[in-house]
Image (cartoon, grey):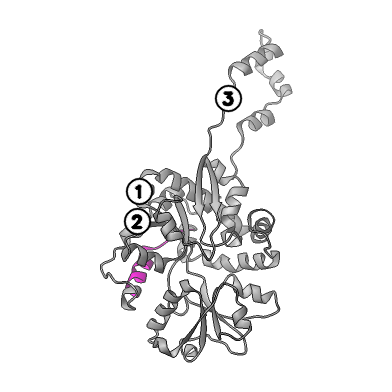
């Protein structure tokens, strides 16, 4: 709920007529308008406190994938927390993990918990996850209806279009199902699914909430096999910061997360409104309104889980992180076998942001 402005509260609740009806003029002392002016001048409110400016680094371009953050800006939730939030776009050439590790921004949004785990454990990046927007990573394999790929056996002998960052997760899926890498042909692709349409690949690695709807606009209904269903059970779009930021600026992170939660609660209740707001005001140029509406609708179930229904959006379970560590170790993706969840995540920011509640709006 938006904070009421003090000046507006005074003018709306105590008009001049109301004031003259009070005992201040009913008694023996009549307060003149000029005296009131002097009184008001002597009791002028202090200048509003300057907002604290912070930057947040996105993993992808500015679109409705980050709709809740646009809502938090537009509805004034960050301002209520004393924050002026500047959101930096990501994209194919932006790697969030080293940027946040280097201190370019205090907060980053990173796509996959698996690479985060490996970067922190094997490479020693000074990072912690303090919340997660997607309860499961929305990565998926997309294929055409005439040649669907919906189970591990379907991968054998097929050409799979992968971006560079998708090779790790796909290797994990192959390892889970004991499929030798040489049984699959990897085709390098970008973030445009055209190679699938031109039959350069039989399946294309995508975000289940994004590229399938690019094809839907063309009248094509692709078959989508979520990586989560294939055994790749990791969180997605995680919120990360340096340990020293958590130590020295925890209050700022709490305020940012509290406002962000409100923004996502609003987004999830107003999907079409925020999609339109993204296209018209906050997203990059050229976004399709219909595609953005579809994407916002598609990502709704990714933001929710039994845990979020019990505790609220952005919550995460240490057991899921532990299972992720074990999966990466078992499939040979993680070198160190003694990785500890406590070295990867903290729940303190979530606990303080919610303050014992399960909803903030």
Q: Residue 163 carries which label?
A: none
| Tag 3 residue | 45
Task: Point out residue 85 in the picture as x, y percentages from the top left corner.
Answer: 54, 47
Residue at x 32% of width, y 61% of height: 124
Q: Nearer the viewer, residue 278 or 300?
A: 278
Task: Point out residue 52 in the picture as x, y percentages from the top left corner.
Answer: 50, 40
Q: Is the magenta stretch mostly helix, strand or loop?
A: helix
Q: Hey, which quadrant is residue 15 in on the image? A: top right
Left/right of residue 233 with respect to residue 279 in the rendered view: left
Distance (Cα) linking label 3 and label 2 = 43 Å
Q: Which of marks 3 and 1 is nearer the N terminus?
A: 3
Task: Give the mark toward the camera: 3 or 1.
Answer: 1
| Tag 2 residue | 126
> Are dots 3 and 1 in contact, CB under 8 Å?
no
Distance (Cα) linking label 3 and label 1 = 36 Å
* 315 over 11 or under it: above or below: below
Q: Which of marks 2 and 1 is nearer the N terminus?
A: 2
| Tag 1 residue | 244
Q: What stretch is highlighted in magenta?
A: 314-327
Q: Which image quarter is the N terminus in? A: top right
Distance (Cα) linking label 2 and label 1 = 9 Å
Query: Badge 1: few (under 14), some or many (20 or more) residues near its Cα, within 10 Å?
Result: few
């Amino acid at each position: 709920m938006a904070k009421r402005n003090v000046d507006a509260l005074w003018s709306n609740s105590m008009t001049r007529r109301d004031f003259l009806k009070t005992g201040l003029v009913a008694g023996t002392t009549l307060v003149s308008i000029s005296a009131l002016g002097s009184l008001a001048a002597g009791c002028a409110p202090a200048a509003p406190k300057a907002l604290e400016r912070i930057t947040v680094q996105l993993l992808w371009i500015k679109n409705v994938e980050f709709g809740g953050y646009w809502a938090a800006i537009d509805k004034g939730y960050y301002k209520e927390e004393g924050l002026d939030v500047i959101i930096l776009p990501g994209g194919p050439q932006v790697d969030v993990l080293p940027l946040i590790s280097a201190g370019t921004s205090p907060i980053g949004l990173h796509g996959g918990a698996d690479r985060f785990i490996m970067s922190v454990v094997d490479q020693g990046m000074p990072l912690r996850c303090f919340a997660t927007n997607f309860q499961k990573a929305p990565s998926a394999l997309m294929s055409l209806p005439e040649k669907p790929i919906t189970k591990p056996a379907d991968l054998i002998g097929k050409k799979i279009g992968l971006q560079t960052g998708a090779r790790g997760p796909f290797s994990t899926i192959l390892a889970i199902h004991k499929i030798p890498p040489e049984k699959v042909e990897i085709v390098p692709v970008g973030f445009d699914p055209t190679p699938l349409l031109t039959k350069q690949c039989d399946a294309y690695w995508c975000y289940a909430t994004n590229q399938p709807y690019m094809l839907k606009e063309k009248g094509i209904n692709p078959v989508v096999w979520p990586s989560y269903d294939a055994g790749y059970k990791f969180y997605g779009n995680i919120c990360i910061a340096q340990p020293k930021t958590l130590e020295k600026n925890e209050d700022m992170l709490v305020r940012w997360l509290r406002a962000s939660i409100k923004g996502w609660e609003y987004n999830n209740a107003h999907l079409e409104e925020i999609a339109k707001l993204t296209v018209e005001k906050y997203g990059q140029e050229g976004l399709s309104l219909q595609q953005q509406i579809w994407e916002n609708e598609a990502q709704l179930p990714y933001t929710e889980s039994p845990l979020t229904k019990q505790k609220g959006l952005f919550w995460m379970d240490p057991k899921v992180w532990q299972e992720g560590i074990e999966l990466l170790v078992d499939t040979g993706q993680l070198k160190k076998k003694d990785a500890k969840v406590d070295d990867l995540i903290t729940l303190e920011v979530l606990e303080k942001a919610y303050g014992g509640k399960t909803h903030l709006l």
